[in-house]
Amino acid sequence: MHQLDFWSMIFVFMLATFVGIDVIRNVSRLLHTPLMSLTNAISAIAVVGSIIIAGEQKTTFSLVLGTIAVAASVTNIVSGFLITDRMLKMFRQQGGTR
């Protein structure tokens, strides 16, 4: 990999991080549940990609990184569903219906 490619990827990663933080910080509470559903769908795509990377087993390093990516993505999906379920239960309790 060329040095310029590496620094370009680092720049894009940092830019995406700051833009993502700013976007998430400005999201209304009413949009939280639909946003979490979208995030879960994106994480599902990340799980598929990380399974492919871990399954290729080209090097031990790629296997370890793929396995970590699978664990992180699955944790993100499960946590997202738990948080979404909890928020939906809060809305149901406020309305008086179960």
Image (spheres, rainbow, N blue to C red):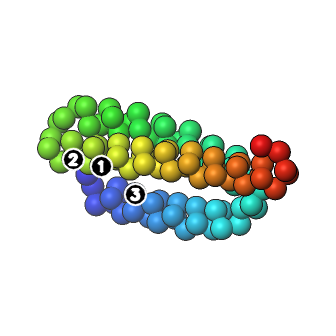
Disc 2/disc 1 C-alpha distance (Å): 6 Å
Q: What SS does tag 2 mark?
A: helix
Disc 2/disc 3 C-alpha distance (Å): 21 Å
Q: Is residue 44 left or right of residue 26?
A: left
Disc 3/disc 1 C-alpha distance (Å): 20 Å
Residue at screen point 41% across, 33% down: 48
Residue at screen point 42% across, 43% down: 74
Residue at screen point 41% across, 38% down: 47
| Residue assigned mark 2 | 64
Would residue 15 be visible to someone looking at this image?
A: yes
Camera-near label (3 vs 1) is: 1
**Image location (x, y in percent) of residue 98:** 77, 43
Question: Which label was assigned to residue 18?
Answer: none
- Name which residue type carries label 3: Met
Whether residues under marks 2 and 1 lie with C-beta atoms below 8 angstroms apart, the answer is yes
Query: Local crowd at mark 2 within 10 Å, few (<14), some, or many (≥20)?
Result: some
Q: What SS does tag 3 mark?
A: helix
Query: Local crowd at mark 1 within 10 Å, few (<14), some, or many (≥20)?
Result: some
Question: Which label was assigned to residue 68?
Answer: 1
